Image (cartoon, grey):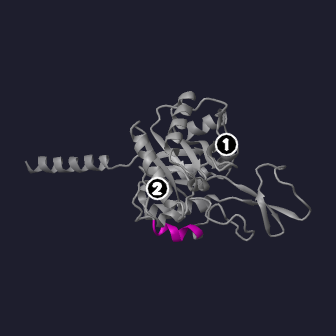
Amino acid sequence: MKTKLSFLFVTLLALCACSEQRVKTNAVYYWSTTFRNDSVQEAFLHEHKIKKMYLRLFDVVVNERGEVMPNATVRFASPVPTGVEIIPVVYIVNDCLYQPIDKLDSLILQRVTQMCETNDISPLRELQIDCDWTTRSRERYMNLLTKLRERAKKQGIALSATIRLHQLGEAPPPVDRGILMMYNTGDVTRLDCEHPILDLKDAAPYLRKLSAYRLPLAAAYPVYAWRVLFRGEKYVGIMHSDDELPTTEGDSIVVREPTLEMVMKTKEAVGKEKSEINDEIVLFDISNENIERIKRYHYEKIFNP
């Protein structure tokens, strides 16, 4: 009898351990005005078992007449991939929050659902909002999210939001979950800031607040680079193509790029503060250029437990 009880106890412990095992999810952001899922991206999604794609649909901006309106809407040059959950993302420019936005929650949800229906994005389970709100705009942003969440819930859609490091010291937004943006930690406009995309020294003070942050979180890590144009020590801009910004004699173009070691150390530091945050790892962002960079610098290791 004693042997049977011992066996039962061990079995129950094993079952409990299995039920507590967390599911790991690999995900990516797609942040472009044209969606094109070619063979290079298809191979990457398949190879790394990508389960989620956070796809920016449009921005919300203020036009010259002070009206809040959509801008930079994505154009679909190919169908979305199958077997990958597509989570639409809407970026809201902070200045919008100072304008009349009583109907913005309704307009956003209506436009998102229409775009998803038109482009065969289904099922629509989650909508994400990205906004770098400030102390001044905080209350209006939170009210907008509260209304949007209630409206989305009626359609069976969860609401998530991006969380910037400096926002960890604030109360969480009224959403179902968040994505902690572990990039753009430094000042790209300073020539002496060698690692503006990611530097653990810059992020560390904010991460101390992570364990007390009461919102389910995933983490997004950078796999992109910037070519930054300086005129002397004066910042001119980020160059997305060779002819985007005019150059003069004496200008310098510097490449800002996080190393794999930087990303891995940051991932480890984030996990120490909130272990479950790395259950879903999101790479920002997927493009053919960045896929080549991922493979060249072995950024695939970020997905490893």
Asked if residue 177 is positioned above or below residue 41 in the image, the reply reads: below
Q: Is residue 235 left or right of residue 142?
A: right
The residue located at (22%, 46%) in the rendering is 11
The residue located at (58%, 48%) in the rendering is 91
Asked if residue 25 is positioned above or below residue 217 in the image, the reply reads: above
Which of the 4 quarters of the picture holds residue 189? bottom right
Q: Earlier in the sequence, mark 2 or mark 1?
A: 1
Q: What amino acid is labelled 1 in the image?
A: Ala
Mark 1 nearby-residue class (10 Å; few <14, some 14–19, many ≥20): some
Q: Which mark is residue 72?
A: 1
The residue located at (47%, 69%) in the rendering is 208
Report helix, strand or loop for mark 2.
helix
Q: Nearer the viewer, residue 269 or 112?
A: 112
Pinpoint residue 21: horizontal percent, then vertical percent.
Answer: 35, 49
In this view, the mark in front (2 or 1): 2
| Residue 84 shows in the view | no
| Residue 240 shows in the view | yes
Which of the 4 quarters of the picture holds residue 158? top left
Residue furthest out toward the left: 1
Q: Nearer the viewer, residue 287 or 114?
A: 114
Name the residue tied to disc 2: 142
Magenta segment, which residues?
202-209
Q: Is residue 194 left or right of residue 166?
A: right
